[in-house]
Image (cartoon, rainbow, N blue to C red):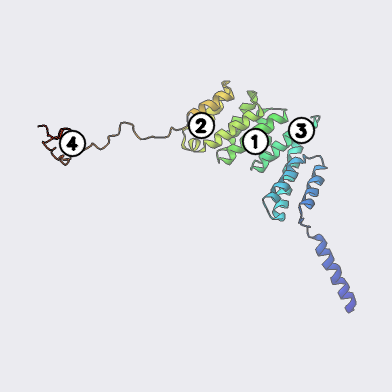
Amino acid sequence: MRQVVVAALSVIVCLLASSRPVMAQSEADLLRQADAAAAKGLPAAPLRNKVREGFAKNRDPKQIEAALNQIASNLEAADRIVREMEPGAAVAARESAVTLLADALFSGLTTDEIRELQRQAQTTSSQDLAGAAKGLSFIKEARLPVTEGTAVMSEAVRQKFRAYEMQDLGREIKRREADYRAGRASLRSLRDTIARGTRPETILRDSRAERPATTRPDATTDRPERPTTTTDRPQRPERPVDRPATPGGERTR
């Protein structure tokens, strides 16, 4: 009976040990995990880069693996969206859009917010959606209303902004977070400006021109006046009346 109990306990211990996730401890192990995820059709570069970056910064392998799994999950979600939009997209174009969408997800955007952005923008281009989503992620990072940010980026898609232009627009909005929060700038006003056909380079130029100027001291500030009274200088000693003798030995007067 005792042998049966011992054997049963051994089996339970083995089952519990096998049920625990095996945590990779080396860079080679994690790179193999990255390659396994890429074998499913996901972009390999973001996965492998995250592993190399983590070890270069001496991160804990468990933390690197957790980040790797998160990126893989984001890539899978982005891949589903892109394949639904453009089933026949070329591999290079698809991977580019998937990587950018996954980056937007990693920054805090949700799949529901991306789908709502697609619905409002009425776009069938995964590249345009990815650029708009990344721009929207900057707005969300700035803790500004996502609904208003979605309207801005949707209008940018309709006005044929390029993917990188929408990203630049999102970055500029994030940089001016304080202005938008204080009411000195408005996402609704920005959407109307885009709807009127204003091009991104003009919007960005005007936005940067609105930066508050650095205050400098007034050039006409009064300086302390110099004292008007002159300090008495010591008088020079009087020269002797007699001049040096001439070569003949007589002094001249």
Q: Is residue 16 above or below residue 29?
A: below
Judged from this view, the residue extending furthest toward the top is 197
Q: Earlier in the sequence, mark 3 or mark 1?
A: 3
| Disc 2 to disc 4, C-alpha distance | 57 Å
Q: Which residue is mark 3?
A: 94
Image location (x, y in percent) of residue 163: 66, 29
Query: Which residue was labeled with disc 4?
Result: 228
Mark 2 vs mark 1, foreground winner is: 1
Using the numbered discs, state the Cα–Cα distance from disc 3 to disc 4 in whole angstroms: 81 Å
Q: Nearer the viewer, mark 1 or mark 4?
A: 4
At 60% from the left and 37% from the top, the residue drawn is 138
Disc sitting over residue 191 in the figure? none
Q: Between tags 3 and 4, which lies in front?
A: 4
Label 3 vs 4, first from the N-terminus: 3
Q: CA distance from mark 1 to mark 4?
A: 68 Å
Instruction: Say if residue 151 shows up in the picture.
Output: no
- Residue 180 located left or right of residue 36: left
> Closer to us: mark 3 or mark 2?
3
Q: Which mark is residue 186?
A: 2
Report helix, strand or loop for mark 1.
helix
